[in-house]
């Protein structure tokens, strides 16, 4: 029988990623990975799906030692609030739009409302914990609401396709590379759950065709190419000083969707020597707020907005809070 991702796995991950100041970290995070309530369901899925990533997930869970909640809270702040380096973002919009809040925030908010859920605004709607909680909710509705089971199943499939799968594997991969065993294990699990089986190209295309930024002056880092990429080969990464559009060549299936969506004509598919290492296709410095000095959007995006306005008014140089 095919094992599907149960609401207990989504709920467990949601609890771990929820902002500690709002809900507190779950008590189970303090025991060893093998004792976590998500361990057994993860092992079941790993046995059924049998992939390298699932093996890594089980291995990472089994190697996770017991760690106090206070240590986990400190690590949470380090990783997600960027206390000592740039943060790993827990918001979909930062991966697909490169700004916070972004269109993704409002899109998922609308879906929660459509499903009859109330939003209390203690966190942005596209926070990982909220998206995972929503998936747990959809899974439970699908299982318990026999009359409308197909409708809930379809809503879940669409949410995974249009939102979860576009960024949660990226978040998971970043975490899996960190030095903190518990968070690396959670990262592996997140990446494995939303792992996309790469479809085989339909025709014998030239496999060295990869996207490049051929017109750098035209790219405004709008993120459309990221949104249409079916395999998350493209992604935005941002720290305090730089916003970059990244390509993971290993994931690219040469479908050309990114080239077709780019209205700016900035991106094109070209034969290129590629050694499969992730590569920054374009980087932009981030603008600083003229008032408080905090980093705001990328200079490329700012220049594009100024060009569309036909001027560069003073307010544009300020962050949202200072305006
Ligand atoms: S390459 Fe095109 S679609 Fe992608 S971020 Fe740049 S302007 Fe947007
Ligand atoms: S060609 Fe297709 S798979 Fe490759 S980066 Fe572009 S959209 Fe993604």
Image (tube, grey):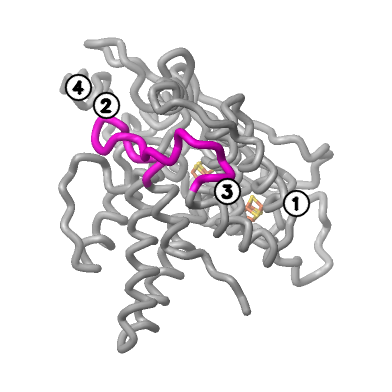
Q: Specify few, some or many for label 4: CA neighbours under 10 Å numbering under 14, 14-19, or 20 or more.
A: few
Nearer-N-terminus badge (4/1) = 1
Which residue is painted at 73% across and 61% down in the image?
50
Question: Can residue 84 be seen?
Answer: yes
Question: Can residue 259 be seen?
Answer: no
Residue 21 position, x and y percent, is 26, 30
Viewer-side residue, 47 vs 230: 47
Residue corresponding to mark 3: 189
**Closer to viewer: mark 1 or mark 2:** 1
Instruction: Quote the CA–CA distance across marks 4 and 2.
Output: 11 Å
Residue corresponding to mark 4: 315
Circle 3/circle 4 CB separation < 8 Å: no
Determine whether the residue tagged by mark 4 lies in a helix, strand or loop.
helix
Nearer-N-terminus badge (1/2) = 1
Viewer-side residue, 102 vs 144: 144
Task: State which quadrant residue 156 falls in.
Answer: bottom left
Nearer-N-terminus badge (3/2) = 3
Determine whether the residue tagged by mark 1 lies in a helix, strand or loop.
helix
Instruction: Quote the CA–CA distance across marks 3 and 4.
Output: 43 Å
The quarter of the picture where the N terminus appears is bottom right
Residue 297 position, x and y percent, is 37, 27
- Extreme-bottom residue of the structure: 147
Instruction: Quote the CA–CA distance across marks 1 and 2.
Output: 52 Å
Residue corresponding to mark 1: 52
Residue corresponding to mark 2: 311
| Chain part drawn in magenta | 15-36
Which residue is painted at 57% across and 48% down in the image?
189
Residue 74 position, x and y percent, is 41, 20
**Closer to viewer: mark 4 or mark 1:** 1
Task: State which quadrant residue 41 falls in.
Answer: bottom right
For the residue with label 2, is its CB less than 8 Å from the closest atom of ligand 1?
no
As for residue 35 lying within the magenta part, the answer is yes
């Amino acid at each position: 029988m095919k094992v599907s991702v149960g609401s207990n796995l989504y709920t467990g991950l949601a609890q771990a990623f929820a902002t500690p100041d709002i809900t507190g970290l779950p008590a189970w995070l303090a025991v060893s990975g093998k004792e976590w309530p998500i361990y057994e369901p993860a092992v079941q899925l790993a046995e059924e799906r049998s992939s390298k990533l699932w093996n890594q997930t089980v291995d990472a869970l089994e190697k996770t030692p017991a760690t106090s909640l206070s240590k986990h809270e400190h690590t949470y702040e380090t990783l997600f609030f960027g206390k000592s380096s740039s943060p790993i973002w827990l918001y979909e919009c930062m991966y697909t739009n490169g700004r916070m809040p972004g269109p993704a925030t409002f899109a998922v908010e609308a879906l929660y409302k459509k499903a009859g859920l109330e939003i209390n605004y203690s966190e942005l709607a596209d926070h990982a914990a909220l998206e995972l909680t929503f998936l747990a909710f959809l899974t439970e509705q699908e299982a318990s609401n026999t009359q409308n089971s197909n409708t809930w199943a379809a809503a879940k499939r669409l949410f995974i396709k249009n939102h979860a799968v576009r960024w949660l594997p990226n978040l998971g991969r970043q975490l899996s590379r960190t030095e903190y065993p518990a968070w690396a294990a959670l990262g592996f699990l997140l990446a494995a759950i939303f792992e996309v089986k790469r479809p085989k190209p339909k025709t014998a295309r030239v496999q060295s065709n990869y996207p490049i930024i051929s017109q750098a002056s035209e790219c405004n880092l709008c993120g459309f190419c990221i949104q249409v990429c079916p395999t998350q080969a493209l992604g935005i990464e941002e720290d305090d000083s730089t916003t970059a559009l990244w390509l993971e060549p290993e994931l690219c299936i040469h479908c050309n969707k990114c080239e077709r969506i780019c209205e700016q004509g900035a991106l094109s598919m070209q034969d290129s020597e590629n050694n499969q290492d992730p590569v920054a296709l374009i980087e932009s410095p981030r603008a600083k707020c003229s008032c408080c000095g905090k980093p705001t959007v990328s200079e490329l995006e700012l220049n594009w907005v100024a060009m569309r306005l036909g001027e560069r008014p003073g307010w544009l140089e300020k962050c949202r809070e200072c305006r």
